[in-house]
Structures are given as structure tokens and as C-alpha cells.
Amino acid sequence: MGKTLGRLRRLPEIECLGPKTIGETLSLLKKHDGKARVFAGGTDLLPKMKRRELAPQYLIDLNGITGLKFIKYEKEKGLRIGAATTLNEISESSIVKKRCPILVEAVSQMASTQIRNIASIGGNLCNAVPSADSAPPLMALGAKLKLVSPKKVRTILVEDFFKSPDKTVLSPGELVTEVLIPPARSGEFWAYLKHTLRSEMDLAIVGVAAYLAIDSKRHICKDIKIVLGAVAPVPMRARKAEAVLRGETLSDELIENAAQIASEESKPIDDIRSTAKYRREMVKVFTRRAIRQSLERV
Ligand SMILES: Cc1cc2nc3c(=O)[nH]c(=O)nc-3n(C[C@H](O)[C@H](O)[C@H](O)COP(=O)(O)OP(=O)(O)OC[C@H]3O[C@@H](n4cnc5c(N)ncnc54)[C@H](O)[C@@H]3O)c2cc1C
């Protein structure tokens, strides 16, 4: 039986800790080295614990920390979202709707209202599954993550965060504290499309985010990012497909060619939701659609 279908069992007694600051959280992680795990919504962590894939002795609740729950916009820095901010707080935020509609597009398609009410953006990224819906749009936007440990604070691109399924560059005892999204400039357009078998409550078979920077006078594609989810061990840029379009006037033929190349670049596997062959075909279809949808917004 596949990993995701493992039997869910009742949890043993676990001590739950409720720090009020990031510093307190880091101290608790250090004190209970290797035995504690942070959680925000628990929507990924608790099923893993019930399947006995993880067995922490202490759970550290991030929900009481105001420094992890905020949405702010500054002209110079752009959008900043605290890691424990819930998906519904993001999709309902007037700031995010105005400054980063692609993120609203992506998170509104995730799970269900009930799950989105507790699930966080930080948890979605730190869980590091290839189908994490927030990853492709954030990568397309050139977003960064702020990582904090007792010794240092570092900032890395979301693109460099994932190492393999379930694995990130986070060191033991390190926290993601916020997501930083650069301010949008004029002439930039995006789309995120997710292909699922069911209309709701389903993980992506394929997710595609497209970002276009267009020269409004000459209609030339100045820059492009195509990011694929659920079709490789980690969310990935389709760089060869991007190269076909960068610097060109976007014709139907060129877009079709890029979509084909993106499909060849993807590295899907057969699993419970789809065959690799079908996923590869859908990369082509959804890459084409995502680029066209971004173009329609020009
Ligand atoms: C029914 C259902 C449907 C779902 N549908 C979707 C979907 O459509 N798309 C999708 O992408 N996901 C989906 N998910 C997965 C899940 O809901 C999301 O990934 C969610 O955003 C996880 O957030 P969380 O706060 O619940 O994470 P948690 O379970 O609290 O944490 C997940 C992992 O990240 C770690 N972590 C959390 N926050 C931090 C932090 N700030 N710093 C360091 N480590 C941290 C935890 O220790 C844990 O290992 C679904 C889940 C369920 C149960």
C-alpha cells in the first residue's frame, strides 16, 4: 500500500508547548533537540504522526506568535507574509488581492475552506511535497524566505529551498519566519493553473505557474518564468522552455514549442493520482494555457 494510504492510528500522549515569541520557539527547539516539532495548522504533520512516519515527543504551536502571523506591504520591499499566516487569511486579504493576485489564485484552489482556515503558507512550503500549490507561484514571483536559527538569520529564494521530497535546506532548529515577495512592476503578468481529477480537495496532478514581463510597445517577452509542480521530485523551473520565449514576440507556434519542451523537461513519476505519461502530456497542455492566460492579462 502506498505511503499516503498508510493506516491512521490514534496518537500517543504528546506535550504541546505554546511559545509567544520566535526567540522562545528557537530555545524550545534547542532544549528538546530532535524530540520537538513545530506546527501551524498540523494538516500535514498530524496525518504523518498518525501514520507513525514521525513521532515527536513535543509539539510546538506557532499560532500564539504574532511575529509569524502578519501580512504587510511596503513599496520598497514588497509583500511580507508571516509563515504561520493561514491560507484563508491570505486569500481574503485585500493587500494580497491587490499586490499579488496569483497567490490568491493558487491558495484559493487548495484543500477546503476548513483546511484553509488552519493550514499555513509556511507549513505548505516546509512540508516540501512536489505538489505544494504555493511553491510554483512563489518561485515564479522570485519570492524569498527568511530563515531564523539561534545563530543566524538568512534569506534564500523559494527556488533554492527544496532539496528532495519532504526535504528542505532548513537546518535542525531553524524556522521559516516569513515569505518575502518583491513588488510587482508594470508590464508583469502571471497565471497559476492546477490540474486535478476532482474539482476540490485534491492535490495537483500538474501545477503550472507562468510569469511574463512584456515590453508594452513592442510586445516582446522581456522575461519569463515557467514553474512546474507535481512533476519532479521538487517544484522546478522549465528553463529550456523559458529560453525559447525570452526576447521573442510570443506567437502561437512559439508557445506550442515551449510547452512541448517544458513537457520534455519535466520528470514525473507514476503514482496513485496519475501515470507519468499522462502528467507529461498535461504539462504541455497546462503550460500552453498558463502562458496564454498571462498574455490575455496584458
Ligand atoms: C484534506 C487535505 C487537503 C489538502 N489539499 C492540499 C492542496 O490542495 N494543495 C496543497 O498544496 N496542500 C494540500 N494539503 C496539505 C496541507 O494542508 C498544506 O500543505 C498546508 O498548507 C500545510 O500547512 P500546515 O500549517 O497545516 O502545516 P503543518 O502540518 O503545521 O506543518 C507541516 C510541516 O512543516 C513544518 N513547519 C510548519 N511551519 C514551519 C515553520 N514556520 N518553520 C519551519 N517548519 C515549519 C512542520 O514541522 C511540519 O513538518 C491538504 C491537506 C489535507 C489534509
Image (cartoon, rainbow, N blue to C red):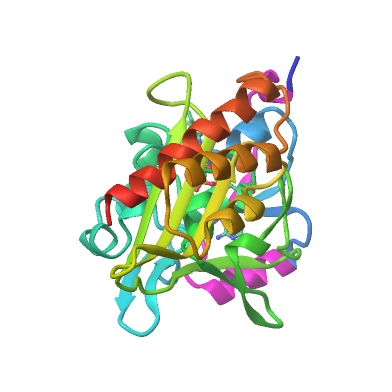
Q: Which residue is depicted at the point 78% across and 57% down?
A: 34
Q: Which of the two residues, 185 or 19, is positioned nearer the viewer here? A: 185
Residue 90 screen position, x and y as percent:
33, 54
Q: Pick whichever, 40 or 277, lies toward us.
A: 277
Which quadrant: the N terminus? Answer: top right
Looking at the image, which residue is at 46% across and 39% down?
288
Which residue reaches farthest bottom?
76
On the rendered image, what quadrant is the C terminus found in?
A: bottom left
Q: Residue at x 57, y 34 (%)?
A: 283
Looking at the image, the residue that sits furthest to the top is 1
Residue 141 percent across, percent down from the top left = 46, 63
Vertical arrangement, residue 151 with respect to residue 160, above or below: below
Place residue 262 in its image quadrant. top right
Who is closer to the viewer here, 225 or 268?
225
Front position in the image: 134 or 16: 134
Q: Which residues are magenta?
A: 3-30
**Which residue is painted at 36% across and 85% down in the image?**
76
As for residue 28 lying within the magenta part, the answer is yes
Q: Can residue 8 be seen at all in this image of the molecule?
A: no
Image quarter of residue 186 = bottom left
Q: Quadrant of ligand 1?
A: top right
Left or right: 171, with 107 as reference point = right
Q: Position of residue 178 (x, y in %)?
A: 49, 68
Residue 83 part of the magenta segment: no
